[in-house]
Image (cartoon, helix red, strand yellow):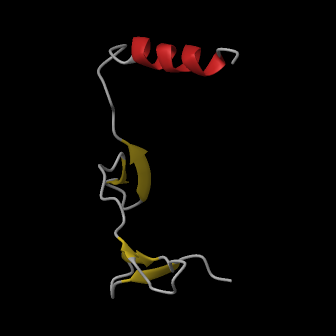
Amino acid sequence: MQLVRPVYGRKGHLKAIYMPAADGSHPVVKPHGGKRYSYQEHFECGSIAWALKRLGKGDELRPLFEQVVADCLVNR
């Protein structure tokens, strides 16, 4: 049983996802086009490596990160 069927464009990019419904129809779910946080960094020597974009300067985001971690560690 196939749950979803991806559809790719001619350049290999994901265009849509078909999800069969209970009545047999195939509604289309478009992929989320969010902001990219990783990119390919090109070096002078010709090699390429993946790099991550910085999300803040210095310790600007540290309090937010610590709050998220603290919230995750709370016993429920």
In the rendered view, would you say 35 is above or below 55? below
User: In the image, residue 68 lies at what x, y percent?
Assistant: 50, 20
User: In the image, residue 40 lies at what x, y percent?
Assistant: 36, 56
Q: Residue at x 33, y 30 (%)?
A: 55
Left or right of 1 in this view: 21: left
Quadrant of the drawing holding the C terminus: top right
User: In the image, residue 25 lies at what x, y percent?
Assistant: 45, 85
Left or right of 47 in this view: 44: left
Q: Residue at x 36, y 45 (%)?
A: 37
Q: Residue at x 40, y 78 (%)?
A: 27
User: In the image, residue 38 lies at what x, y percent?
Assistant: 38, 49
Q: Residue furthest front?
A: 23
In the rendered view, would you say 8 is above or below 44? below
In the rendered view, would you say 45 is above or below 62? below
Pick whichever, 33 or 18, lies toward us: 18
Q: Quadrant of residue 44?
A: bottom left
Q: Quadrant of residue 26?
A: bottom left
Quadrant of the drawing holding the N terminus: bottom right
Pick whichever, 33 or 42, lies toward us: 33
Picture mark count: 0
